[in-house]
Structure formats: C-alpha cells, structure tokens
Amino acid sequence: MGVTKDFFMMLSQNKLLNNGAKHWGLKLGAQSVVAGTNIEEMIKSVKELNAQGMSATIDNLGEFVFEKQEALEAKEQILDVIQAIHEQGLDAHISLKPTQLGLDISYEFCRGNLEEIVSKAEKYKIFINFDMEDYSHLHLSFDLIDELSKHYTNIGTVIQAYFHESAETIKAYKNYRLRIVKGAYKEPEHLAYQDKKDIDRHFIELIEYHLLNGKFTSIATHDHHVIHHVKRFVKTHQIPNDKFEFQMLYGFRKDLQQQLVKEGFNFCTYVPFGADWYGYFMRRLAERPQNLNLFAKQVFNK
Ligand code: FDA
C-alpha cells in the first residue's frame, strides 16, 4: 500500500476528525459522492436514479459506534428509511454496517437492533444487505447473518476478494444474494492479498463462481476491465440478466453507469447519505488518490 493510500486510510480511522466532521456539513467535495445529509435529500437523489433506470442500495452513513445512544439513533434512522422506501415506492433496498448498530458495544445489543430492522423490512419485502467491514468484525458479522437467517429471508451480504479465506466463505454462502467486491480496508498479508494482480484474479474467480453456482450476484466495481470480462462471461455461459446486476458507488463513473443501463443490464447505485460521511469519503480517497483532483475541482468551482 503506497504512502498516499496509507495516509488517507489513517485519516479515515481518526476518531477526532470523524466526530468533528459530523458538524461540518458536506465538505471537501464530499457532496459529489454523498447523496445529502438527511432523508429528504437522499429520497430526491434515489428518485433521480430510479428515473434513469437504476435501483439503489441506501446506506445511512456511520460505523464503529461505541455509544448505545448513537447506535439506537442509527437504528431509528434506518427504520425511517425503510418506511420511506415503502411509502414513496422507491426501487431501493438497504445497506448497513453492523458496527453502526453496536457490534463493538455488545453482540446481543447489535443483534436486537438488526432484528428490528430486518423484520420491518421483511414486512415490506425490502432486502437488507450486510456490508462487510474490517477483518476484526468479519466472523461476528457472519454469525449475525447466520442467526437472523433462521427467521428471515431478506438478508444478503458481501464477499471481499482480498481475503484468502473468501474462496471458502463464498461456497458456504452460495444460497445468499451476494455483493462481491475487492475489499476496502487495510488488512495484513497473512489474511489478505496485497498485490493488485492477485486481488483482481481472485475477484474474477469469485464472481464467476457465484454467477455459475449462486443465487444472485451483485458485481460491485468501477473497474472497466472486470466489467468487460463479466459481460463476456455471462454471454458465453448464457447467464440471464435477472441473475446478476452491476453496482457502483454514487457519483463515480456516471457515464459507465448509464452505459450499462443502456445496454440492458440491471444496475444498482450504492447511495450513502447522512452527517457521518468522513470515514467513507477518506476510504474513497485511499482507494483512488486521483479522486482528490476530481473533488478539488468541485471545491474550487463553487
Ligand atoms: P479499483 O479501485 O481497483 O480500480 C481498478 C481500475 O478501475 C483503476 O485502475 C481504473 O482504471 C478504473 N477506475 C476505478 N475507479 C475509477 C474512477 N472513479 N474513474 C475512472 N476509472 C476508474 N468494500 C468493502 O470492504 N466492504 C463493502 O461492503 C463494500 N461495499 C461496496 C459497494 C459498492 C457498490 C462498491 C462499488 C464498492 C464497495 N466496496 C466495499 C469497496 C470495494 O471493496 C473497493 O474498495 C472499491 O470498489 C474500489 O475497487 P474497484 O473494484 O472499484 O476498482
């Protein structure tokens, strides 16, 4: 991992800045990749995406919460988003992070919060995706999914290709709707591939496995090489369009997003919103420091 990547990754995990930024409003160009700070602004963005033929997975920003009150507020906010999806008839589902709902406070507390969310969503036939965070939360998150899946069917999750063990994990979760990603956190060599070539190769292998054997596959990437490969693969193997979708983050590669819709593929945009945008935003800069140019332009064009 290069110096710039390390620097932004370090900034993303700085608690003081994470907390401070909640009071700044959307700054530093974050407004181009975060769909507003409240539900009303987010709904407007989702309606615009729906009108362009894209569905949305909505993320109420926030993670690594250590205060019960904060986790409860996040739960209420997500319940409100579910209500809004239902009432407004949005083509959308939810993405959430277990550490926002209190996984670092207590497993049982988090499970209770998640169960309220999943059961309300199931009532409205809304899908809940459990985002995957860093390795220290990986197995606990899968435990939560296993437990809740005994009672609810509207749950899916994410497989991070940089982990060596994800080749096995994907087999165990092949009956789930899965989003497959490269992986966004800094992880040590004994757990995760470090070399881009290895991560890309494993990413393709996992996507192909789930397309052939799994339930539904969300291919989440901005990498046009991977997207081209998948397009050829589904054609060769006659995998119908209703078995998979492409996903990208809000505000990234909009031309490519629209192109995929035009070509007739299902497309879902990951729509983050809320005051707690800082960690998410810094991870995007760590992934692709060139994004800094893009965001700088937005700041100075104001
Ligand atoms: P990557 O950043 O490796 O770029 C590959 C190539 O694509 C670049 O060299 C360039 O050519 C091109 N490219 C990429 N971005 C571009 C841009 N903006 N403009 C022009 N060209 C560009 N992670 C995680 O750990 N847990 C999770 O739950 C999720 N969830 C998630 C949802 C969605 C919808 C997405 C898109 C991503 C995630 N991620 C994630 C993040 C993921 O793990 C990964 O860190 C980022 O997607 C970056 O990897 P990419 O595959 O996009 O390409």
Image (cartoon, grey):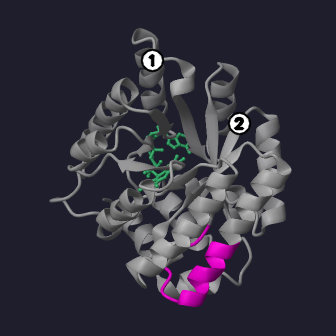
Towards the viewer: 15 or 294: 15
Q: Does any portion of residue 63 appear in the rendered image?
A: no
Q: Earlier in the sequence, mark 1 or mark 2?
A: 2
Instruction: Say which amino acid is labelled 1.
Output: Val
Q: CA distance from mark 1 to mark 2?
A: 20 Å
Seen from the viewer's position, the closer of residues 280 and 69 is 69
Q: Does any portion of residue 95 appear in the rendered image?
A: yes
- Report the front residue among 154 and 38: 154
Q: Which residues are magenta?
A: 61-76
Q: Is residue 276 left or right of residue 66?
A: right
Q: Residue at x 56, y 40 (%)?
A: 247
> Whole-percent x and y of residue 173?
34, 44
Q: Is residue 261 placed above or below 193 in the rendered structure?
A: above
Circle 1: element type: helix
Mark 2: is the Cβ under 8 angstroms from ligand 1? Answer: no
Q: Can you tell which mark lies on residue 38?
A: none
**Residue at image x 62%, y 70%?**
277
Q: Disc 2 residue type?
A: Met
Q: Can residue 64 be found in the magenta stretch?
A: yes
Residue 68, position in %: x, y? 54, 88
Tell me which residue sits at (45%, 17%) in the image.
Answer: 234
Where is 131 relative to 136, above or below?
Answer: above
Residue 70 shown left or right of residue 170 in the figure: right
Residue under numbered circle 2? 54
Question: Is residue 155 rendered magenta in the image?
Answer: no
Q: Quadrant of residue 248?
A: top right
Report whether 104 appears left or right of 118: left
Q: Nearer the viewer, residue 75 or 138?
A: 75
- Rendering coords of residue 244 (x, y %): 51, 29
Q: Residues within 10 Å of mark 2 (few under 14, many from 20)?
A: many
Label 1 belongs to which residue?
A: 234
